[in-house]
Image (cartoon, grey):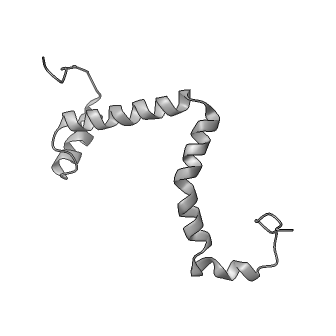
Amino acid sequence: MATTVKVSARIPSALAREMERLIEAGIYSNKSEIIKDALREFLLKKKYLQSDESEYIKNMLKAVKPILAEDWESEADAHWDEYGGIDYEPDKA
């Protein structure tokens, strides 16, 4: 039994040209790989959108938190520590 299924679809010629550009650039090896990648991304997006919104937000925060922490602790951001504006961290009292 085959592990893949052939599916035919008609797409606009502009999309087909973009697919060819991706293949020529070496980003993908063929059109099937592009379509499989796009379909995986689409289905994951749909899965997250249909799931519990609070679970989606928790997962997004888990992914973003280390990036934000790195930025908050960077030397480039240190000059804002002395800024007299609105505190953006909760009181520690």
- On the image, the x and y values in percent for residue 66 come to 54, 61
Count of picture labels: 0
- Extreme residue in the top direction: 1
Q: Image point 54% across, 31% down: which residue?
A: 49
Most foreground residue, 59 or 12:
59
**Compared to 45, does 29 lie above or below?**
below
User: Which of 6 and 1 lies nearest the eye of the viewer?
Assistant: 1
- For this view, does 61 lie left or right of residue 12? right
| Relative height, residue 77 to residue 45 (above, below) | below
Residue drawn at x 24%, y 40% is: 19
In the image, 67: left or right of 85?
A: left
Q: Left or right of 25: which side holds 72?
A: right
**Which residue is situated farthest in the right direction here?**
93
Q: Nearer the viewer, residue 13 or 54?
A: 54
44 sits left or right of 25 in the view = right
Percent across and percent down for residue 63 are 52, 52
Q: Residue 18 appears at what percent x and percent y?
A: 26, 42
Instruction: Name the quarter where the N terminus is drawn.
Output: top left
| Quarter of the C terminus within the rendering | bottom right
Q: Quadrant of residue 87?
A: bottom right
The residue furthest left is: 1
Query: Quick check: 34 above or below 68?
Result: above
Residue at image point 65% right, 81% down: 78
Q: Position of residue 79 (x, y in %)?
A: 67, 82
